[in-house]
Image (tube, rainbow, N blue to C red):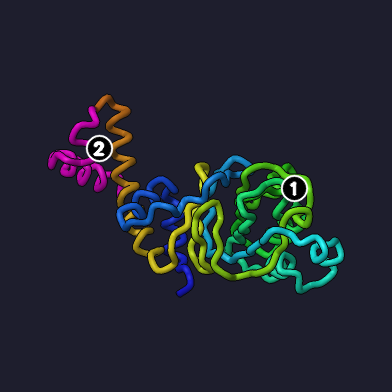
Amino acid sequence: MPLSDATRAKLRKVSTATVATCLFKRGLRGQMIQGALPLHAVTDSMVGEATTVRYIPAREDLNTLDVFRSPEHPQRRAVENAEAGKVLVFDSRKDARAASAGAILVGRLKARGVAGVVTDGGFRDSAEIAALGIPAYHTRPAAPTNLTLNQAVDIDVPIACGDAPVFPGDVMLGDADGVIVIPAHLAEEIAREATEMTAYEDFAAEKVAEGRSLVGLYPATHAASLEEFAAWRTARGR
């Protein structure tokens, strides 16, 4: 089922940290993409369903510059067919010695209305990509073309990205801390629960700033904390 506008809007207002806790409660501990950080300051969270590209180690006789001449090259096909609102995710084998993509390809993704791009490798032209404004996450800049190291072989298949499993259609949430993968069938449920958790976390943070002890407040082990939260929530329309 496609990600609803309501669920997308809820996820934009919660953090990867809160979602990680929601997933942990369900026994899912490895959904955070390790090492992938934003290229520029994050003001709005990235939310979208995953479309994937899988790289394997390059075989030199098959991975020459000429492969880019074909519109059927997996990397180029993934970029050219990427749908608006989706997030393109590269499995670059956690190796940033060569780029997963560069500014021209990411510019094409922006023009197509893609919600973001993520790799567990690196991007070349990283300053140019940052200036594009599209949410982009990588481990570090990488100037060499991916052809020197990686060979694109599949699109829209299950992949590993930064040790996290990513299935096509899974929901990618990115903020200043990084990117987390929400299994597609849990997206609405997680969005609802994370929204509730965020409201309480905002309340607790406000009380801590006022000098309140954590005891009984965070976590909410005292009934009085929950009663005060209910009043706080009503007053703020939360």
How far from the left and from the top, in percent, is residue 169? Answer: 51, 68
Q: Which mark is residue 124?
A: 1
Q: Secondary structure at mark 1?
A: loop
How far from the left and from the top, in percent, is residue 125? Answer: 76, 46
The stretch of residues the image draws in magenta is: 213-238
* Residue occupying the far top of the picture: 211
Residue 4, compared with residue 179, is above or below; it is below
Q: What residue is shown at x 71% (from left), y 69% (from top)? A: 74
How far from the left and from the top, in percent, is residue 62? Answer: 80, 66
Identify residue type, mark 1. Arg
Q: Is residue 128 magenta?
A: no
Q: How many marks?
A: 2
Q: Which residue is mark 2?
A: 218
Residue 235, compared with residue 12, is above or below; it is above
Q: What residue is shown at x 41% (from left), y 45% (from top)? A: 17
| Left or right relative to 194: residue 36 | right
Q: What residue is shown at x 29% (from left), y 44% (from top)? A: 200
